[in-house]
Amino acid sequence: MESTVIKSTNFSAWFGSNHAVRNVSMEVPKNKVIAVMGPSGCGKTTYLRCINRMHELTPGATSKGEMLLNKEDVYAMHPIFVRLKIGMVFQRPNPFPNLSIYDNVIAGYKLNGIKIAKAEKDRIVEHSLTRVAMWNEVKDSLTKKGSFLSGGQQQRLCIARAVAMEPEVLLFDEPTSALDPISTSTVEQLFHELKTNYTLIIVTHNMQQAARISDKTAFFYVGELVEYDDTKKMFTNPRDLRTQNYITGRFS
């Protein structure tokens, strides 16, 4: 029996009068990779940001419905606690340009005022960079700025920064769209390794990527969750005609 880590029930979100997400109900099983796909403007990124309340940072954003993390109401928790438990990696690599690789990894602790001993910092940095298969690449360059790394390495550094906080869930908003094919392949391989310890929810425009990386796929269209199923089943035998049309390229 799969345990559910994220569960939304009749969840809706607005930006002012724009009804961006409409009554979405879905359950995300623990230690799986979930792809969220759909055309531009369909609500998939808004839904992703609602999971850890990042959408609240936009003026005029409102929501209603239920969003649970391990059966606890996300919207009854302190936002900082939510974002410690549910990390996020964005579309473009965004290491802090003035910080070293080392300080980038532990930035979450400083930003949240969490004091830890130097030995513990060292352990977290090595552990987090090892998790994203970067330790051997950068262990002799930890004092260099994160911005000296390649695009693919910068994105993995951002993933290490999220992993350092020991979250349960990692959210990714088109994490490879700014990367070259080789870096994309490296990050995709990393997703398979990360799901041993984390649950991953990944917004992607790339259907081939969704098919390669995910256990389950959600298809959003005009703010609605049209279909949500095992990835293989969804790509070979979608239930909804809109899903079929999107997969076969009849609209995008």
Image (cartoon, helix red, strand yellow):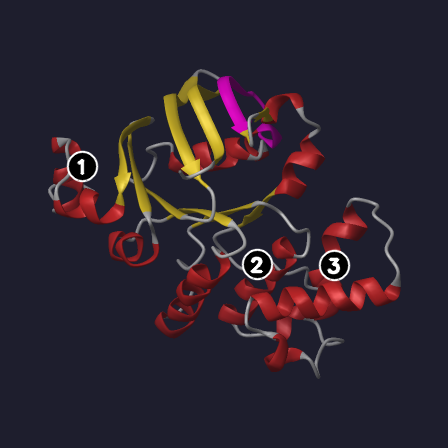
**Mark 3 → mark 1, Cα distance in angstroms:** 41 Å
| On screen, residue 228 above or below 172 | above
Within-10-Å neighbours for mark 1: few <14, some 14–19, many 20+: many
Q: Which residues are magenta?
A: 56-68
Instruction: Give the residue displayed 70% in from the left and 62% down from the top.
Output: 104
The three-letter amino acid code for the residue at tag 2 is Ile
Instruction: Give the residue displayed 35% in from the left and 70% down from the top.
Output: 181
Q: Secondary structure at mark 2?
A: helix
The residue where tag 1 is placed is 243
Considering depth in this image, is 120 or 187 the residue closer to the camera? 120
Q: Mark 2 or mark 1: which comes first in sequence?
A: 2
Of the numbered discs in the image, which one, if any, rests on residue 106? 3
Within-10-Å neighbours for mark 3: few <14, some 14–19, many 20+: many
Q: Position of residue 128 (x, y in %)?
A: 65, 64
**Mark 2 → mark 1, Cα distance in angstroms:** 30 Å
The residue where tag 2 is placed is 159
Q: Secondary structure at mark 3?
A: loop
**Is the N terminus in the top left, top right, bottom left or bottom right quadrant?**
top left
Q: Are the residues tagged 2 and 3 within 8 Å (C-beta)?
A: no
Q: Mark 3 or mark 1: which comes first in sequence?
A: 3
Q: Secondary structure at mark 1?
A: helix
User: On the picture, is 235 further left or further right than 148?
Assistant: left
59 in magenta:
yes
28 in magenta:
no
**Mark 2 → mark 3, Cα distance in angstroms:** 12 Å
In the rendered image, is residue 230 in sight? Answer: yes
Instruction: Give the residue displayed 19% in from the left and 44% down from the top.
Output: 233
**Is the C terminus in the top left, top right, bottom left or bottom right quadrant?**
top left
Q: Position of residue 149 (x, y in %)?
A: 59, 74
The three-letter amino acid code for the residue at tag 1 is Thr
The three-letter amino acid code for the residue at tag 3 is Ile
